[in-house]
Image (cartoon, rainbow, N blue to C red):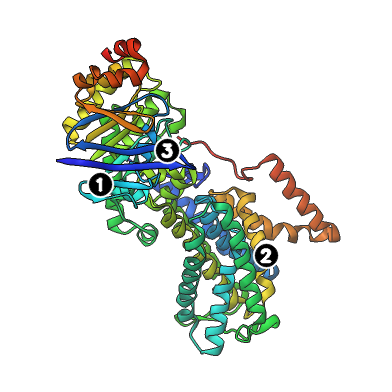
């Protein structure tokens, strides 16, 4: 079953074509990577899927529901969560509060509930707290929940961002360069975490990543974007041996070495 | 179950004063005792001034939700104050409504005004809101000045003072206690809101709109909620203001009024409840305390404000560390 189905999407800014007639799909339960040289349009495709950009043409469906005209918060509610290339935590708020933000779209208490502290609101607050705590433990953060998120080491900020995305209870998690800036050990842990997100929580994962070694180890399918055009899609082996990919990626010989990971 | 997170740091470090039930009871008892005794010790003139300060506490707490929590610059907050006051004035005088029926009506009108002004402008970046609210404030004041129903430039007089379960609220001391009650409700509601799903959402949106949207938060809706809650505070303040004075005129709701309320919020410390309360007391009490220096008092007050902004740009109240 296809969870995310992108068809014929074209996006341009002031005449420059960022995405051209892109077809792309993520099957339910899969770990899929989107790779391509810098400026290929990967993050633009992410932003189109999550509702931040409005492509001029095409269709984007999540579980059969058209999302092209939706606002980002509506897309999130539908089950797509994301992280950002340059970590965007609420820096002056605590780690726990950051993760609690993900639960906003799964809860409903309003002004009256908050002012009167109705029993339903108290239960909901407890549930928000409990689920956020569970997400934090899941990504391996056991303490320091009341520290300001901005004071954490970079690798930990990345984890908080993933926990925050998990708290929205998504069906599909979009990770924008999750390994950028991580140490070798942290990358190893990230690979384990992404696997567990899919295996234990049943969430499909789509990642943009420049570390091809990591991509080749973790992905079930890979799509390659170059200059806004989707030039290849297939399994790891198919992509590694695809001459068009090798050429587009880095030039012939180097590309081969790079993709061999 | 671990303790719930303290949420927004609205108490500005004061939370240590009531972090256990015993301390909490003691703190509440001290505040209540001070509130009850103050007018008896200070005399009738001070009671009127304190009542006015408490009115500004309510108004500043309301504006603090808009400016301090949600980070929206509102330059026309006096408009909601006017909506509350005029609703009570018009409905009690022209339609013979009881004050306690006029009060919810005032809230309803403030909500309607908030939705009408907020819905189109809150989609835009916050700078636009400042301009639109500035205009809205003037529209309300000029309408009040020129309409027959609002009594024109001379305003409305003879607004009845309300009864509450057989208690005729009419003397300055009665109104002082009523405003004490309003201020307490205002503080409790503000604190509870800050520590709620919505209160956190205001902070998320203020810190990073895009990240908040990506987390499934409808930023327009959340901002509108802040704007409307602020409007309700303003309208309630206005309703009791009208009942207290018995007379209202358009000049009570000028741009200067909006600025004064905004000053209370910024001076004390945006987003921090004790700071906002302090700010409200300063903007009302400082000119009174400086009365002896005659003509110089506004100058001294202005210089004081400038010094605060220069040396404590985040407000007089200390920031207070997080655990």
For label 2, the crowd category at 10 Å Cα-Cα, with few meaning under 14, some 14 to 19 and many 20 or more, is some
Q: Earlier in the sequence, mark 3 or mark 1?
A: 3
Same chain shared by disc 3 and disc 1: yes
How far from the left and from the top, in percent, is residue B199? 43, 51
- Residue at 62% across / 83% down in the picture? B150
Q: Does dot 3 land on a helix, a strand or a loop?
A: strand
- Residue at 34% across / 48% down in the picture? A104
Q: Does dot 2 land on a helix, a strand or a loop?
A: helix
Residue B51: give its label. none
Label 3: which residue? Answer: A17
The Cα–Cα distance between marks 2 and 1, rounded to whole angstroms, is 50 Å
How far from the left and from the top, in percent, is residue B58? 55, 62
Q: Is residue B176 visible?
A: no
Question: Which chain contains the residue that carries disc 3?
Answer: A
Q: Is residue A4 above or below residue A200?
A: below
* Residue sitting nearer the eye, A71 or A126: A71
Label 2: which residue? Answer: B255
> In the image, which is nearer the foreground, mark 3 or mark 1?
3
Question: Which chain contains the residue that carries disc 2?
Answer: B
How far from the left and from the top, in percent, is residue B297? 80, 57
Q: Is residue A254 visible?
A: yes
In the image, taking residue A36 as reference, residue A28 lies left or right, namely: left
* Residue sitting nearer the eye, B92 or A16: A16
């Amino acid at each position: 079953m296809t969870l995310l189905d992108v068809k014929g999407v074209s996006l341009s800014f002031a005449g420059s074509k960022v995405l051209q007639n892109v077809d792309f799909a993520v099957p339910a339960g899969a770990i899929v990577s989107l790779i391509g040289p810098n400026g290929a349009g990967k993050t633009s495709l992410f932003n189109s899927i999550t509702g931040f950009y409005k492509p001029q043409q095409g269709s984007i469906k999540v579980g059969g529901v058209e999302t092209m005209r939706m606002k980002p918060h509506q897309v999130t509610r539908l089950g797509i969560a994301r992280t950002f290339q340059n970590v965007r935590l609420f820096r002056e708020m605590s780690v726990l509060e950051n993760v609690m933000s993900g639960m906003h779209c799964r809860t409903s208490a309003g002004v009256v509930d908050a002012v009167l502290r109705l029993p339903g609101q108290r239960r909901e607050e407890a549930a928000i707290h409990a689920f956020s705590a569970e997400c934090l433990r899941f990504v391996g953060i056991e303490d320091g929940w009341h520290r300001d998120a901005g004071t954490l080491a970079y690798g930990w900020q990345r984890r908080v961002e993933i926990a925050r995305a998990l708290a929205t209870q998504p069906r599909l998690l979009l990770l924008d360069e999750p390994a950028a800036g991580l140490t070798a050990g942290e990358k190893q842990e990230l690979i384990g975490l992404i696997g567990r997100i899919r295996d234990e929580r049943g969430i499909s994962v789509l990642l943009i990543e420049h570390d091809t070694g990591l991509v080749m180890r973790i992905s079930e399918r890979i799509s390659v974007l170059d200059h806004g055009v989707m030039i290849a899609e297939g399994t790891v082996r198919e992509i590694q041996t695809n001459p068009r990919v090798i050429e587009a990626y880095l030039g012939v010989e180097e590309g081969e070495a790079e993709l061999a990971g | 179950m671990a303790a719930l997170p303290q949420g927004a740091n609205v108490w500005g470090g004061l939370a240590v004063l009531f972090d256990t039930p015993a301390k909490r009871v003691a703190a509440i008892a001290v505040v209540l005792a001070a509130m009850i005794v103050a007018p008896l010790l200070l005399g009738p003139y001070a009671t009127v001034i304190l009542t006015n300060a408490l009115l500004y506490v309510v108004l500043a707490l309301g504006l603090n939700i808009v400016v301090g929590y949600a980070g929206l610059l509102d330059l026309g907050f006096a408009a909601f104050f006017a909506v509350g006051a005029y609703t009570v004035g018009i409905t009690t005088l022209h339609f013979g409504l009881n004050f306690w029926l006029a009060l919810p009506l005032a809230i309803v009108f403030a909500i309607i005004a908030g939705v009408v002004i907020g819905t189109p402008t809150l989609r835009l970046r916050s700078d636009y809101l400042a301009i639109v609210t500035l205009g809205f404030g003037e529209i309300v004041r000029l309408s009040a000045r020129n309409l027959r129903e609002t009594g024109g430039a001379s305003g409305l007089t003879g607004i009845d003072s309300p009864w509450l379960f057989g208690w005729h609220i009419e003397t300055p001391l009665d109104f002082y206690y009523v405003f004490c009650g309003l201020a307490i409700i205002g503080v409790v509601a503000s604190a509870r809101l800050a520590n709620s799903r919505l209160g956190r959402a205001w902070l998320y949106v203020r810190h990073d709109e895009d990240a908040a949207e990506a987390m499934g938060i409808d930023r327009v809706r959340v901002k509108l909620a802040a704007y409307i809650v602020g409007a309700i505070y303003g309208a309630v303040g206005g309703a009791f203001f009208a009942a207290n004075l018995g007379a209202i005129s358009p000049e009570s709701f000028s741009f200067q009024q909006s600025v004064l309320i905004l000053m209370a919020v910024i001076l004390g410390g945006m987003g921090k409840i004790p700071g906002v309360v302090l700010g409200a007391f300063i903007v009302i009490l400082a000119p009174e305390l400086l009365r002896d220096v005659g003509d110089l008092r506004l100058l001294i007050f202005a210089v004081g404000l400038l010094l605060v902004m220069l040396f404590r740009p985040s407000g007089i109240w200390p920031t207070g560390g997080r655990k």
